[in-house]
Amino acid sequence: MTEPLVRVDDVARTYHSRRGLFGRAVEVAAVDGVSFTLGRGETLGIVGESGSGKSTTGRLVLGLEPSDRGTVAFDGAALPKGGTPDWRRLRARMQMIFQDPLGALDRRLPIGEQIREPLDIHDIGDTASRVARVADLLDRVGLTRNHGRRYPHELSGGQRQRAVLARALATTPDFLVCDEPISALDVSIQAQVVNLLVDLQAEFGLAMLFVSHDLRVVRQVSRRVAVMYLGRIVEEGSADDLFASPVHPYTRALVSAAPTPGRRLTDRIVLQGDPPDPADRPSGCAFHPRCPVAEARCRIETPRLVDVGGGRRAACLPVSGDATSTREAA
Amino acid sequence: MASASPLIRLEGLSVSFDGVRVLHGVDLDIGRGGTLGLVGESGSGKSVTWLAALGLLPGKARIEGRALLDGEDLIAASDRRLDAVRGGRIAMIFQDPASALNPVLTIRRQIGEALALHRGLSGRAVGAEAKRLLDLVGIPDAERRLSAYPHEFSGGQNQRVMIAMALAGQPDLLVADEPTTALDVTIQAQILDLLDSVRRETGMALVLISHDLGVVSQTCDRVAVMYAGRIVEEGPSSRLFADPAHPYTRGLIGALPPLDGSRRRLVSIAGTVPDPRDPPPGCAFAPRCLHSDRRCTGDVPQIEPIEADRRMACVLAVHRRSEIAARAGREHTTAETVAP
Amino acid sequence: MLRFFSLRVFRALLTVTLVVTFAFVVLRMSADPALIILGPEAPPEVIAAFRKSWGLDEPIWVQYVDYVAAIFRGELGRSMRDGRPAIELVAERIPATLALTLPALALKIAIGIPAGIWASLHRGTFVDRTVMAAAVAGFTVPSFVLGLVLVLIFSVQLGWLPSGGQDTWIHAILPIVTMGVGGAAVLARFTRSAMLEVLGQPYMRTASAKGLPWARAIRDHALPNAAIPTVTIVGFMVGTLIAGAVVVESVFSWPGVGRLLVVAVSNRDLAVVQCILLLVAATMVLSNLMVDFLYGFLDPRLAAGARAGGH
């Protein structure tokens, strides 16, 4: 087996935040021991609700934030520390796009120049080839040269996201992290961008980490999917399988809650209660207070992510049986 | 459009801001206890329609047409009369529950206002009824939570509080404007469940405004699809989703990735929504439509019945509906299956 | 809560210390009090004796240490001019100043806040533009100019009101109006923008959607929210009650703290200047604390944090 492009091993990130103006500082474990691998040209989708740590995971993997523990390896070597010259050099091969394309673009520069910028920074090609490359990139993402001369506010939301994508692809990266890239777009435009992402991914042989709360979109672009809940992966498997036959009770609820046109509300799993406060994580399995199949031990033991057969991993005691948990020190 | 006397009937409702028309003559009936989903993208006019009907738009909005509640025109009604209707016979809830509630007033005060206005309750009765409403919408420990402020609730709970407040006036119609858009998927399911169950219990009618076709079809018997300030298609939700007629409706459904079965390339709608200041001639969807021809750039298509209980606004409707369906069917079968 | 307030008090003390030190250094370095008080023609031995008796012959840092030590003993020093305790001199002027500043504050609030609310409710109309044009005029015209204009009109031309002095309450009218107009203009602008912000909030639409008449929605929903930023400005104005009348007192020759300060500075009468500065700083600090405390009342989001100390 060849070495994966990205290997993430037990990364974690804890924030210290103050609640309110007067509050004491509290520790919030945004990401708490996440591991996965990503092969070349492969797409891993990460789904989860707010507070699940899915976006933080994306930032940890790129080294945009330091991990409190664990390691990230890129192309067989440990990821250099964020901000160092080595890391900056590597950034040409790892790019990221965000939910809000307007925030990611510089309002004072025409988008063509912004697409060119990474080529200048990483000193790729000569002037003539850079100009040609920008034209080519604009074309690939479905924009015209004329669009390249416009400023971000002169473009629609979908066009801006295309521009951001073109800029991210300028350095022909191997790896692209997409954080809710289409959530701010209208439904009809979402489909355009999703199709574009799928095309580009195939064309460029990109490895992608696709972070979203939208199960449908994640399934559309990903081969494998990881479901996160309160900073941990609770289930991971192939996209088709996982959504067709989810095993973790949280995934089951998520899939059943995803609205489908033409389907009435019937025998759906509706989870009770709110997702817990990451600052006040329930003991044992963090999902147990909302879980329809929780047992007594789920309150005490923390399930580990284990193979449950068929290339699927899940972190659930009732699903995986015994001997897969770590009893927490009281 | 069958029922003889609808609960509310919108007739030619139009809205302009600073001379720019954003709503172009919306006609819509909602029967007693009926459920209507109003679907569209941003700028389609789905929210403006109901804000206009209830007189909730800013003063510079110019409103034409009628909104008849049991025959009484709300557009022409006095402020006093509107105040009696709003929160009374027609209640409305909004997208972001955290900012839709007043941050410096307790929940008791905010629900109590509606109870005092529309039910004439005062003193202890207000507290008791407010508690009952909070229980009804599933807020645990209602008695104690009455004295809490909005920031002490989660997003989902705040939307429950908004629903409790809406129910305070015992409305005949609840207009829910993107009630779950700001919420997580699992919380969205809870709120939709709650809306459905209170509707069943109280027998009120429900208008659910959403950009999400799935959300609407879960809770509504009828669906109206809006595009660029017009209703382009309306009908029973089961038939509308199984057999969409308008090219835009087809596009919206095709644009939604499936959650099961084989993955197909998404049928995307090219281009973007037109600028209301510079609308295209004829049908507003024509520039993005796969089936448009020169007839589409002539007159604006009027919404007309295409079969019993269904309406559509498309020039090609009458003549070419079967042809569109056949062509679209071919598109589906020839679309390559995507394997990432 | 305690932590929050002790931090505030510490910051306040730091502010006072910096003000006092700065004033000390500037006043001592800029001119020789002995020369100014005794006059340049005074015999050198008199000047030397004066310096000796006030400690002016010591190095400046020694003088500073002595001064700070005295403050800690509760001694604010004596006026170099007539030898009376500085605190006494200042204290006897305070009532005269408050007689101007308190009514002026009331005037600012009584005109500024309603005008701001009124303008915000008629946004973009003639009413709004008129109020805002008046407000811009009100705070761009310096108070000495406004004071002189008022004197020209009401004293010189019309002869209705006295142009200076402190004999009756009639004498106070022009100085109070002069101060009130500028403050009212500032307050009107702040209130208007606070109201506009609040009026655009979704909860105002919710209030209308539940059938609350507009006037009640304004009173019960908009005003409590708009009060939060407005309190900050009013608090700042309370902080200037003691020192805010310097210019106006000079224009109308009103014997208040402000006039005393001007005279003391030109005389380099250090103890008096420092005493006034301490008083001003203390008022500012107190009014700031008061504002913080009021926030807790007006904004339950802060109060909850304070009560629970985070959940």
Image (tube, rainbow, N blue to C red):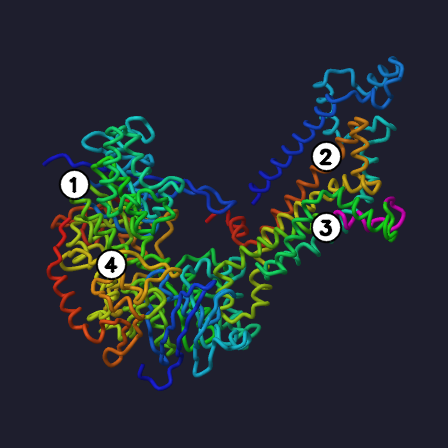
Tell me which chain the residue with mark 3 is part of: C
Q: Residue at point 85% right, 24% down?
A: C37
Q: Are marks 2 and 3 on the same chain?
A: yes
Secondary structure under badge 1? loop
Secondary structure under badge 4? loop
Q: Residue at point 33% right, 73% down?
A: B36
Q: Is residue A187 visible?
A: yes
Q: Give the CA distance from mark 2 to mark 3.
A: 27 Å
Q: Quadrant for residue B298, please give it.
A: bottom left
C243 sits to left or right of B267? right
Q: Give the CA distance from mark 1 to mark 4.
A: 26 Å
Secondary structure under badge 3? helix
Amino acid type indicated by mark 3: Val
Q: Residue furthest top?
A: C45
**Quick one: C165 or B100, which is closer to the camera?**
C165
Q: Residue furthest bottom?
A: B4
- Pointer 2 residue: C278
Q: Residue at point 67% right, 42% down?
A: C286
Local crowd size for mark 2, using a 10 Å CA cut-off: few (<14), some (14–19), many (≥20): some
Q: Are marks 3 and 4 on the same chain?
A: no
- Pointer 4 residue: B269
- SS assignment for the magenta stretch, majority: helix
Count every numbered label the image shows and give the total: 4
Q: Give the CA distance from mark 4 to mark 2.
A: 71 Å
The reply to whether discs 3 and 4 touch (Cβ–Cβ < 8 Å) is no
Q: Are marks 1 and 4 on the same chain?
A: no
Tag nearer the camera, 1 or 4: 4
The reply to whether discs 1 and 4 touch (Cβ–Cβ < 8 Å) is no
- Pointer 3 residue: C181
Amino acid type indicated by mark 4: Ile
Question: In the image, which residues are magenta?
Answer: C164-181
Secondary structure under badge 2? helix
